[in-house]
Image (cartoon, rainbow, N blue to C red):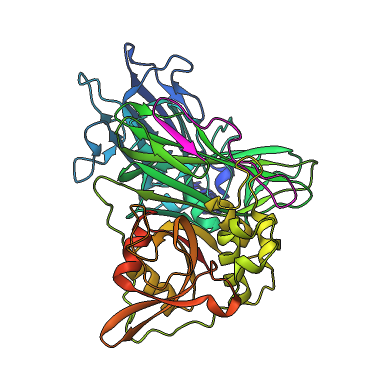
């Protein structure tokens, strides 16, 4: 018997070593949170909620206890705390039984990271999800990922934690927002441009009956209406904003883009740029367009009362006449302007902007088109010239009626013009640009439509910049196409297609750069970027 017993024990140990995890005793954990007005709650076990529901009380601290069941396994966790941020460094990461957070300071927890340590950590996944203020239950994070929010001042209100064998799914539970972590974004310079599924995913706060596909934002196949909501974004101070979008809209489907802005008076209401679709009567002025903080006049948001905004958020409402038909949103842009202190434009490239080519943009005069609309279609005629340059054959009249705003009763709605190009497969948006920005586009082979105001002689009445050689005596608002830059006798000129010419052959003109700059500045340097 003395020889048999050691052999028996050895056999048992060998069998246990090769048993699957599910057949062994699994690690266990318990955890408790310190809740505003309540203090430390009782311990709860794997998958159970710690915190409160529906009481709007913040979590201030957390302790997690690991029973490793004999595995070489430990646990570490850190929290993102009001006024502190992540508790990083040697004192930031806590281990089993230690408190992460604060006591007696009334600071809220805003996010958490939890990870397993030790030689056996690769045998398990640790999952955790939080209930965040204004967001609800967020998606599961795992293995050190961030869960919660940062930059919003949102409190955590409750948490669930679970350990499962590597590759297994976390427990089924309520999820109000699929994102596990939402960090407030910042807009670089004066242009927000979300133009990929990856960016829509990264900037998503809410996906209500919409899904993200390789093509962009679409409706859930069973839905007639859905809403994509972005995160809130920090910006430089601005008092004007133009939003634009690219979307395909089959079978009378449509979208309505809305945004809200943040000022010292708080957030504005959701304000609308109207309803857009290629097969509907497009309407600005649909939905809420003004409140005490800001208002949208056709295509431009103006912050009221001399204030400036330092934050923005957008949402896109997708609507369909029947299930299975969906708009597809592939781009959302917001161009920002500060008429008091200009916002510097940021560029991430450094191209050679010398010896620029003059682009062979087709010459189209608006003045020889349909007499009923000829004097009103500078914008769609400019867009038609750009589209024909790229190989899309479209007349100014066709473009005009594809752009027409049936509420504004005009062809000059800026985002409606770029949305039209977007519906034909181009990347197209409204921007507040610069001369360097125009040169960058020309260097890349892209003509640009810009909004100007001018008179062609100092003798013409009116307080407008003079542009020598302009085809009409004056205009308070007009779209033309920048086709290149050139130098003549030491003077720099902008090569322009001006649709106000009386004939197609007269459309190509040369404007002195300084005079053009003054005329363009009247619109705040609005540009249609089409690629």
Q: Magenta span has 291? A: yes
Tag count: 0
Q: Can you give x and y, in whole percent of width and height, for residue 405 in the image?
A: 63, 46
Q: Residue at x 57, y 80 (%)?
A: 505
Q: Is residue 141 visible?
A: yes
Q: Can you give x and y, in whole percent of width and height, for residue 493 in the image?
A: 35, 78
Q: Is residue 67 visible?
A: no
Comparing 82 with 22, the one in front is 82
Q: Residue at x 50, y 25 (%)?
A: 48
Comparing 186 with 414, the one in front is 414
Q: Can you give x and y, in whole percent of width and height, for residue 219 in the image?
A: 68, 45
Report the span colored magenta. Answer: 274-297
Quick one: which residue is furthest to the top in this view? 37
| Left-right relation of 264 to 302 | left
Comparing 265 with 359, the one in front is 359
- In this view, 528 is above or below 99: below
Comparing 105 with 387, the one in front is 387
Q: Can you give x and y, in whole percent of width and height, for residue 81 in the image?
A: 27, 33
- In this view, 181 is above or below 176: below
- Residue 223 sits in quarter: top right
How would you classify the magenta stretch by its main secondary structure? loop
Quick one: which residue is furthest to the front in this view? 459
Q: Magenta span has 313? A: no
């Amino acid at each position: 018997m003395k020889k048999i017993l050691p052999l028996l024990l050895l056999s048992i140990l060998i069998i246990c070593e090769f048993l699957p995890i599910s057949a062994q005793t699994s690690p266990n954990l318990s955890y408790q949170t310190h809740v505003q007005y309540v203090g430390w709650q009782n311990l709860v076990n794997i998958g159970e909620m710690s915190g409160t529901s529906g009481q709007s009380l913040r979590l201030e601290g957390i302790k997690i206890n690991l029973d490793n069941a004999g595995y070489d396994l430990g646990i570490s966790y850190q929290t993102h705390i009001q006024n502190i941020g992540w508790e990083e460094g040697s004192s930031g990461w806590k281990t089993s039984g230690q408190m992460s957070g604060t006591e007696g300071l009334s600071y809220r927890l805003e996010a958490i990271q939890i990870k397993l340590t030790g030689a056996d950590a690769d045998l398990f996944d640790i999952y955790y999800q939080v209930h965040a203020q204004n967001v609800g239950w967020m998606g599961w994070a795992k293995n050190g990922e961030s869960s919660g929010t940062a930059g919003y001042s949102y409190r955590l209100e409750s948490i669930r934690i679970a350990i499962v064998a590597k590759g297994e799914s976390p427990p089924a539970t309520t999820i109000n927002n699929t994102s596990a972590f939402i960090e407030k974004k910042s807009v670089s310079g004066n242009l927000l441009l979300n133009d990929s599924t990856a960016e829509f995913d990264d900037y998503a706060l809410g996906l209500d009956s919409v899904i993200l596909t390789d093509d962009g934002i679409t409706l859930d196949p069973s839905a007639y209406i859905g809403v994509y909501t972005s995160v809130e974004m920090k910006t430089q101070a601005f008092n004007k904003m133009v939003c634009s979008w690219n979307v395909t809209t089959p079978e009378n489907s449509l979208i309505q883009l809305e945004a809200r802005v943040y000022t010292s008076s708080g957030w504005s209401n959701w304000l609308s740029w109207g309803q857009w679709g290629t097969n509907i009567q497009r309407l600005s002025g649909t939905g809420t367009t003004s409140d005490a903080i800001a208002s949208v006049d056709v295509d431009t948001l103006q912050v009221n009362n001399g204030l400036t905004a330092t934050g923005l958020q957008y949402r896109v409402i997708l609507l369909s006449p029947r299930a299975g038909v969906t708009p597809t949103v592939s781009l959302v842009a917001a161009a920002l302007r500060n008429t008091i202190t200009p916002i510097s434009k940021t560029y991430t490239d450094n191209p050679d902007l010398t010896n620029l080519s003059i682009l062979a943009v087709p010459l189209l005069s608006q003045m020889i088109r349909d007499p009923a609309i000829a004097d009103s279609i500078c914008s769609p005629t400019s867009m038609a010239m750009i589209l024909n340059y790229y190989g899309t054959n479209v007349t100014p009249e066709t473009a005009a009626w594809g752009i027409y705003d049936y509420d504004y009763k005009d062809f000059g709605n800026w985002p409606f013009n770029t949305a039209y190009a977007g519906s034909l497969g181009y990347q197209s948006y409204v921007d507040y640009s610069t001369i360097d920005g125009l040169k960058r586009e020309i260097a890349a082979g892209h003509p640009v439509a810009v909004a100007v105001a001018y008179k062609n002689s100092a003798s013409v009445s009116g307080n407008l910049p003079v542009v020598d050689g302009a085809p009409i005596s004056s205009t308070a608002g007009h779209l033309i196409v920048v086709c290149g830059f050139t130098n003549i006798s030491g003077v720099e000129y902008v090569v322009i297609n001006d649709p106000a010419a009386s004939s197609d052959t007269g459309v190509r003109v040369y404007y002195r750069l300084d005079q053009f700059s003054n005329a363009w500045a009247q619109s705040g340097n609005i540009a249609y970027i089409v690629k």
